[in-house]
Image: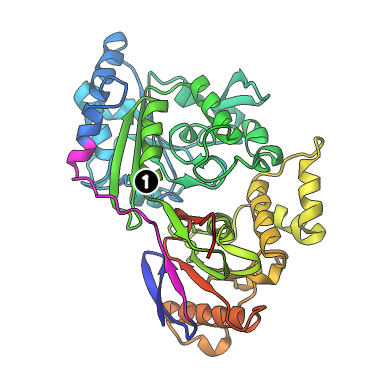
Amino acid sequence: MKLKIEYGEGFIDVNCEHPVDVRGMAGNPEAIPLPQGITDALKNPINSPSLLEIGRGKLESNPDARAVIVVSDNTRPVPYRGEQGIMRYIIRTLLEAGFSQPQITVIIGAGSHRNMEADEIELMLGLQESGLGEVNVTNHGYDNDDHLVYLGTTSRGSKVTVNRQYYEADLKIVTGLVESHFMAGASGGRKGICPGIVGIKTLKIFHGAKFLSSAKAADLVLAGNPLSDESLEVAQMAGCDFLVNTTLDADKRMTGVYAGDLVEAHRAAVQKIREYVVVPLPHRYDIVIIPAGFVGINHYQAGKAAIEAARAVKPGGKIIIVAKNTDTDPVGGRGYKQSLKLLAKYGKTEFLRMISDPQWQMIQEQWQVQMWSKVLTQIEREDNLIYCALEIPDAEYEHLPGVPGFQLLDPSEWQNLTDEEKITRITEAAIQRAIDSSRTSHPSIVLLKDGPYGIPEVAKNPL
């Protein structure tokens, strides 16, 4: 059969002689009319005055008031740009309220991710093409104490530092995408602030081993989820005047805009995605194939797909991830690489023991390696994971030990093929390798076509 697998902004057609069950999100939500759905949400928010009213009120109190808009970075498919994106309508509302463009600042709330370059920012936001180029744009510096302000300590002991420019602004707006999140339950809402614009010290507990080991640190779980609770407490300390969150379907069409109160608007968006993101499965499978999706710009981010695949695979089964790594570093940041080396040197059991020690000095991005350890525990053997990508096998990365799934290099005889042809051949070879090495002669195989955005849920009484 021929499998259609998401790859970058398109798809590849992969041949497989073995039967494959193709599964996707159960729901089929309607897309909202655009841009009407955006403007209506800004005018009629949830449990809040309209953005226009709030903006005018801030300027009445202080004609020199400054507005700050926190946005996600380009690892999230937030619909910011263009006539059907949210950014121009937020800014136009502020201009209508009386703010000048220089009074408005956009902060890239990337948490501990790398800074975005100017061309990447324009591609994501489209401010120049919208005639809004005088709006200030800045990257958040999570490790720059001069850019942070200390707010106190949370009930769980986190020392809260947050972006100073945001905290001192008169009007604070937070934007983002609400989708299932494999650690915090759901993205969006409070996560735009924590981890979006907090300092490295605040992440020590939030991204620490204890929180991530909680059974409630999982997809679509908010009640009792320590990451969600901590994130909300930090966000409320920092303050938020207006939230603008969106939801998308599997085809990246906008299914809702949820604006207004930080808590209530986010809660409504989470309720929306619960209706359709679950992928019902009759049983677990011997082999799970999954695309890394939009978020899988590097190996670090592709871990999100691995976590979802682990929910669908049998213990000791095999996972195949197909990724187009578009980031400037297809592996990930320095701390991620350092943590991968520790995983390779000591193994997952000792790695988890080390990072759980109260005296451990947290390494930035170690949390994603902790999540990879969960995946490796489920599949039991590291060679049961195959990571299909073209970008990592460069000579620059051949010295890196312990990159999970890093097995298939690009064969020399394929050098004259296009990238699409290469990744197709590599994926076909990976599937065949998984079948040939399976513990059964007729392995069950599933393609989770929606990648990390669909949440597998196995029937309580599996077939």
Q: In this view of the protein, can residue 127 be seen by the observer?
A: no
Q: Please state the horizontal and vertical placement of residue 113, each as a whole percent of the image.
A: 54, 46
Q: Is residue 56 magenta?
A: no
Compared to residue 275, the image places residue 441 above or below, namely below
Read off the residue under disc 1.
275
Mark 1 neighbour class, 10 Å CA radius: few under 14, some 14 to 19, many 20 or more: few
Give residue 431's quadrant in the image: bottom right
- Foreground pick, 286 / 92: 286
Q: How is the image coloured?
A: rainbow
Q: Nearer the viewer, residue 411 or 306?
A: 306
Q: Amino acid at mark 1?
A: Glu
Residue found at the very far top of the displayed protein: 61
Q: Residue at x 23, y 43 (%)?
A: 130
Residue drawn at 48 percent across, 56 percent down: 452
x then y, percent, for residue 108:
44, 39
- Relative to residue 438, is residue 252 depicted above or below? above
Q: Secondary structure at mark 1?
A: loop
Residue at image x 67%, y 33%? Answer: 205
Residue with the most extreme bottom position: 413
Direction from residue 432 to residue 50 in the image, left or right: left
| Quadrant of the image containing the N terminus | bottom left
Image location of residue 413, percent across then percent down: 54, 90
Q: Main secondary structure of the magenta part?
A: loop
Instruction: Magenta stretch: give its range.
Output: 19-38
Count of numbered tags:
1
Magenta-colored stretch includes residue 36: yes
Q: Is residue 97 above or below residue 142?
A: above
In the rendered image, is residue 120 in sight? yes
Residue at image position (79%, 59%) is 347
Residue 103, relative to residue 319: is it above or below? above
Residue 420 place in picture, x, y as percent? 42, 77
